[in-house]
Image (cartoon, grey):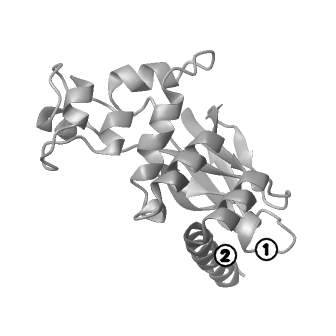
């Protein structure tokens, strides 16, 4: 049933990437650290719907997916710390807190039953500035917008969530091979750095 609803031609009835990620069959597998079942497919479903990857070469999607490494963040765990050297960026995958409505049928019933849950808190100088959840990404600022590659914020998990890690050397190789990806990441990283600086100034 999951595959059938993923392949529907009508976009109004076809499941989105987020809905696929939150299907019990996928989520239950993702939260077991000793089982990598479906992680490659979940990663592909995740990144292909991000604005960052809109209209990019399909080969780019395949290459990025192949480089992603799965991890699980637990409540209270620091994923990154401000001031540390950045060596990777992250994409946020599934979280067990997302609820699915009653019934076993997919389609519109499943869509109505899904609640997007946040699982990560972003802190600047100890103050929370935003929360992140499925489909968000972070960590690119240190890799692309700071010469010293230092982290500019703390990111802490307040509930269990799946992460996909992309290491700096892979980011470098991929952005050299796919200039559009580098341009988009650079623009977004610089915009986030500027917003972070504004937050620091306002709090001073």
Q: Is residue 109 visible?
A: yes
Query: Does 82 appear above or below 179?
Result: above
Depth check, mark 2 against mark 1: the one in front is: 1
- Circle 2/circle 1 CB separation < 8 Å: yes
Determine crowd level at label 2: few under 14, some 14-19, many 20+ residues with C-alpha closer than 10 A: some
Point out the image quarter for the N terminus: top left
Q: Position of residue 124 (x, y in %)?
A: 69, 65
Q: Is residue 88 left or right of residue 70?
A: right
Name the image quarter holding residue 18. top left
Q: Is residue 45 left or right of residue 66?
A: left
Dot 1 lies on which element? loop
Dot 2 lies on which element? helix
Q: Position of residue 53 (x, y in %)?
A: 47, 60
Determine crowd level at label 1: few under 14, some 14-19, many 20+ residues with C-alpha closer than 10 A: some
Q: Position of residue 44 (x, y in %)?
A: 47, 42
Mark 2 or mark 1: which comes first in sequence? Answer: 1
Numbered circle sitting on residue 20: none
Residue bearing mark 2: 193
Q: Is residue 85 left or right of residue 200?
A: right
Q: Is residue 19 left or right of residue 141?
A: left
Residue drawn 14% across the image and 23% down it: 105
Residue drawn 19% across the image and 42% down it: 14
Query: Does 203 appear above or below 118?
Result: below
Residue bearing mark 1: 146
Q: Position of residue 137 (x, y in %)?
A: 56, 55
Residue drawn 18% across the image and 19% down it: 104
**Of residues 197 and 29, the one drawn nearer to the viewer in this rendering:** 29
């Amino acid at each position: 049933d999951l595959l059938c609803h993923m392949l529907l031609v009508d976009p109004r009835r076809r499941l989105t990437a987020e809905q696929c990620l939150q299907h019990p069959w996928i989520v239950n597998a993702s939260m077991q650290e000793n089982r990598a079942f479906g992680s490659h497919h979940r990663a592909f479903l995740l990144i292909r719907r991000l604005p960052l990857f809109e209209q990019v070469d399909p080969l780019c999607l395949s290459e990025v997916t192949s480089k992603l490494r799965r991890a699980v963040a637990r409540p209270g765990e620091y994923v990154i710390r401000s001031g540390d050297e950045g060596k990777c960026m992250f994409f946020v995958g599934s979280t067990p807190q997302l609820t699915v409505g009653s019934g076993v049928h997919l389609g519109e019933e499943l869509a109505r039953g899904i609640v997007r849950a946040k699982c990560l808190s972003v802190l600047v100088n100890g103050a929370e500035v935003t929360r992140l959840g499925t489909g968000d990404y972070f960590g690119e600022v240190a890799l692309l917008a700071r010469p010293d590659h230092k982290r500019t914020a703390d990111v802490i998990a307040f509930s269990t969530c799946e992460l996909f890690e992309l290491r700096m050397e892979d980011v470098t190789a991929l952005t050299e091979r796919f200039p559009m990806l580098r341009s988009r990441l650079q623009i977004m990283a610089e915009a986030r750095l500027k917003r972070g600086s504004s937050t620091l100034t306002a709090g001073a």
